[in-house]
Image (tube, rainbow, N blue to C red):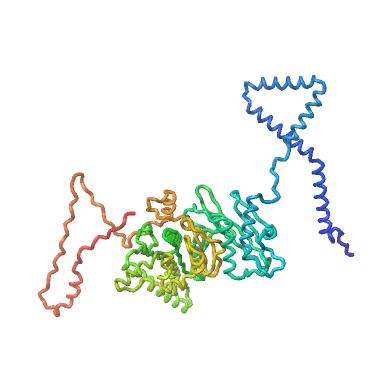
């Protein structure tokens, strides 16, 4: 069977389609130009008809008869007047053309006088950094044209720059961090302070794109996040930095917000976290948020170095092993945590050697949350005890295979007081509150791509997980629900996430005694234990002397007090 050749339109169809599309576009533009008066008059007639219907609907029913009579009289007079219908038609077309005109404001060809002055001043400020005496055709020179250096620009409603593309010469050292920092600081100062700017350097094209970042949402309350076991939501960031969003409930509405997710567990590369900030920056809020998420699948030990009762709502809850605020209790809890880490490692190692899966008691995550542990360093030195931070060496070094996670939160000025294991093994870092660029770079290991500002809301800062990028961070609102200054809606959101109270292991409670009305409660008389008769024989002649002593009744047990639910 002979092959039939393909249609000619398929062989060179792309060129013909492009040519046909161009012809159709040209014809449409020509028809629009020709029929523009008709389109304008039709649009005006439609607007006049809509205005007439609206006028008729607004007229009361008792006046509609008079209105109809008036309209009919006008029509009759126009019909009887010589050339009346022709004049009426001309008047109607003129009114329709006037009503159907394009009312959209004409776009300005360039910036106004104030915007031009702002761009010119910014250009003059960049001249010392982007100019050289040996350049025969300098792009930046005093009194030069700024429109060649700024090909793209945009302004917000307040007249400040919201987006800007800056061209710079090829000999500028854009590969050096110090040179970049100088330009970024200058652009942020000249474009307007109090805002966060994002800088994108294009080394190949010799262009710098400056954009203004919108403020992160600060009204997201604590709630159940859609995550898997081993994922912890630290906060929320910009949509351009992450490829994932979480559905959140905000009042009666729902919206998707990009989160900063910290992964822990056996396969985590950053199993421990360090959070630093100034007083009131929100580090305690971050610890409460992490604790509420950790209690879903694990156990928590909390060390409160502030001593202000920020974690009193977690005391006695299911999964909370301890909430310690004293030196003795903190030392005992951290010693137990170190011993528990070693026990889990030994049990898991024995199971691996035997070819068995790890025991179940080693799979449940254990979280150690420490708020201001440096406060106990001075107390331990005064009492001659060991620094509690030294007890974190085993959980920090061997916590990942044992499912033990350590989270440390402290103040920025106490960074030097942190022990070496804490600074070495906490590769996930969070900085909350105002901080300088040098502090951010020294703590996070890399400078942020935005300019830090001086005034930030609580829970606002930066986060970096290992060697990843630096993210802007806003911690979800997780305040102390027992604080009177906290709004009721936020308190209820935190209280709804708290696990139930823990019942005692032995299940003993104090029974309530029935009392008659008007009679005072009398304390029960303590019964004396029965006396055990002593045998007259010698102990050697009584082989059953030991069992007789074993049958001696014990004193009454002390009743166990349980916390009210």
Which of 565/361 is in front?
565
Q: In this image, 64 relative to 301: left or right?
A: right
Position of 82 relative to 336 (above/below): above
Q: Nearer the viewer, residue 194 or 565?
A: 194
Q: Quadrant of the N terminus?
A: bottom right
Up/down of 392 relative to 105, above or below: below
Residue 123 quadrant: bottom right
Between 344 and 199, the residue placed more toward the observer is: 199
Position of 378 with respect to 188 (left or right) is left
Q: Residue 190 location in percent, x, y? A: 58, 57
State the image coordinates of residue 402 (x, y, percent, origin top left): 44, 72
Q: State the residue in front, 377 or 294.
A: 377
Farthest-out residue, left? 536
Q: Is residue 328 visible?
A: yes
Residue 287 image position (x, y, % from top left): 43, 61
User: In the rendered image, is residue 358 in sight?
Assistant: no
**Which residue is most to the right?**
2
Return the x and y of residue 457 as percentages of the image width and height: 47, 55
Q: Residue at x 37, y 65 (%)?
A: 303
Left/right placement of residue 283 relative to residue 63 reads left
């Amino acid at each position: 069977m002979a092959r039939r050749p393909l249609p000619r339109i398929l062989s060179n169809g792309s060129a013909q389609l492009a040519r046909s599309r161009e012809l159709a576009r040209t014809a449409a533009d020509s028809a629009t130009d020709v029929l523009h008066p008709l389109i304008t008059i039709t649009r005006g007639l439609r607007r006049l008809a809509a205005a007439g219907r609206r006028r008729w609907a607004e007229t009361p029913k008792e006046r509609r008869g008079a209105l109809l009579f008036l309209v009919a009289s006008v029509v009759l007079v126009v019909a009887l007047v010589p050339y009346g219908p022709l004049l009426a038609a001309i008047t109607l077309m003129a009114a329709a053309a006037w009503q159907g005109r394009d009312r959209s404001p004409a776009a300005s060809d360039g910036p106004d006088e104030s915007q031009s002055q702002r761009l010119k001043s910014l250009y003059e400020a960049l001249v010392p950094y982007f100019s050289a005496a040996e350049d025969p055709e300098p792009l930046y020179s005093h009194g030069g044209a700024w429109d060649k250096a700024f090909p793209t620009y945009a302004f917000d409603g307040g007249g400040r720059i919201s987006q800007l593309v800056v061209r710079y010469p090829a000999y500028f050292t854009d590969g050096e961090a110090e040179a970049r920092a100088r330009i970024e600081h200058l652009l942020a100062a000249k474009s307007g302070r109090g805002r966060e700017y994002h800088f994108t350097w294009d080394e190949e094209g010799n262009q710098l794109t400056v954009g203004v970042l919108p403020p992160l949402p600060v009204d997201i309350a604590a709630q159940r996040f859609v995550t898997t076991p081993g994922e912890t939501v630290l906060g929320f960031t910009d949509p351009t930095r992450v490829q994932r969003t979480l559905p959140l409930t905000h009042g009666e509405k729902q919206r998707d917000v990009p989160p900063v997710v910290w992964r822990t567990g056996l396969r985590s590369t950053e199993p421990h976290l360090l959070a630093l900030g100034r007083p009131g920056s929100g580090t305690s809020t971050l610890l409460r948020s992490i604790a509420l998420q950790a209690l879903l699948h694990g156990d928590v030990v909390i060390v409160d170095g502030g001593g202000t009762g920020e974690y009193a709502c977690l005391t006695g809850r299911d999964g909370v092993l301890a909430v310690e605020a004293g030196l003795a209790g903190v030392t005992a809890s951290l010693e137990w945590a170190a011993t528990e880490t070693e026990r889990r490692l030994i049990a898991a190692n024995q199971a691996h050697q035997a070819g068995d899966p790890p025991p179940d008691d080693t799979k449940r995550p254990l979280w150690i949350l420490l708020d201001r542990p440096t406060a106990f360093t001075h107390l331990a030195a005064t009492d001659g005890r060991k620094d509690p931070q030294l007890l974190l060496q085993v959980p920090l070094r061997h916590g990942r295979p044992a499912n033990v996670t350590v989270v440390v939160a402290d103040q920025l000025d106490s960074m030097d007081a942190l022990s070496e294991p804490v600074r070495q093994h906490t590769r996930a870092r969070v900085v909350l509150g105002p901080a300088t660029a040098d502090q951010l770079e020294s703590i996070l290991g890399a400078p942020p791509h935005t300019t830090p500002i001086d005034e930030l809301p609580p829970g606002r800062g930066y986060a970096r997980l290992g060697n990843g990028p630096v993210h802007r961070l806003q911690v979800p609102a997780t305040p102390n629900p027992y604080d009177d200054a906290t709004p009721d809606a936020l308190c209820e959101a935190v209280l709804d996430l708290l696990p139930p109270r823990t019942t005692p292991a032995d299940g003993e409670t104090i029974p309530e005694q029935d009392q008659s009305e008007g009679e005072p409660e009398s304390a029960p008389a303590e019964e004396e234990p029965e006396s055990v008769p002593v045998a007259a024989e010698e102990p050697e002649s009584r082989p059953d002397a030991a069992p007789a002593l074993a049958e001696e009744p014990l004193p009454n047990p002390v009743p166990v007090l349980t916390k009210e639910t």
